[in-house]
Amino acid sequence: MPIIKSAKKRVRVTRKATARNIKTKRSLRVAIKAFSSALGGTKASDAHKKAQSAIDKAGKKNVMHKNKVARKQRQLSAKAKAAGVKITSTKKAPAKKPTKK
């Protein structure tokens, strides 16, 4: 056990962060497995969106490296496309700026 006050705090902070990261990783695995099992069915598009979202969250929280996030998303999209799932974009188009005359 640490003796110094700041080291004790680091232990507490690390414990909280570890729990948070484990929760994120678990939800990521669940979403990917749900997508894999739904590939043949009608809910595949919805499962794909949820899996992509879970991967994005893991990348945003630095649980996964950004390159790994991109690779996993490409792999999911390739599987979905091979299975014939219609992939819809989840990102909104940027708003157009009004032009001045």
Image (cartoon, rainbow, N blue to C red):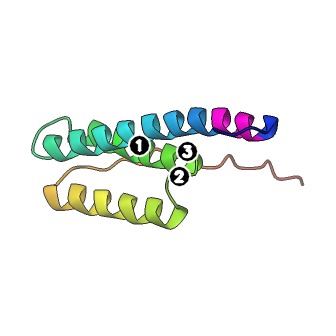
Q: Which quadrant would the N terminus be assigned to in this image? A: top right
Q: Mark 3, residues whose alpha carbon is within 10 Å: few (<14), some, or many (≥20)?
A: few
Q: Report the residue at 14% width, 42% height from top.
A: 37
For label 2, the residue is 59
Residue 14 x/y as whole percent: 62, 40
For label 1, the residue is 25
Task: Label 1: state its secondary structure.
Answer: helix
Which of the two labelled residues, at mark 3 and mark 1, occupies the earlier sequence position?
A: 1
Q: Is residue 45 magenta?
A: no
Which stretch is magenta? 7-13
Task: Label 3: state its secondary structure.
Answer: loop
Which of the two labelled residues, at mark 2 and mark 1, occupies the earlier sequence position?
A: 1
Which of the two labelled residues, at mark 2 and mark 3, occupies the earlier sequence position?
A: 2
Q: Report the residue at 44% width, 34% height from top.
A: 23
Residue 72 x/y as whole percent: 37, 60
As drawn, is 100 to the left or to the right of 43? right
Q: Which quadrant would the C terminus be assigned to in this image? A: bottom right
Q: Mark 2, residues whose alpha carbon is within 10 Å: few (<14), some, or many (≥20)?
A: some
For label 3, the residue is 92
As drawn, is 46 to the left or to the right of 90? left
As drawn, is 63 to the left or to the right of 98? left
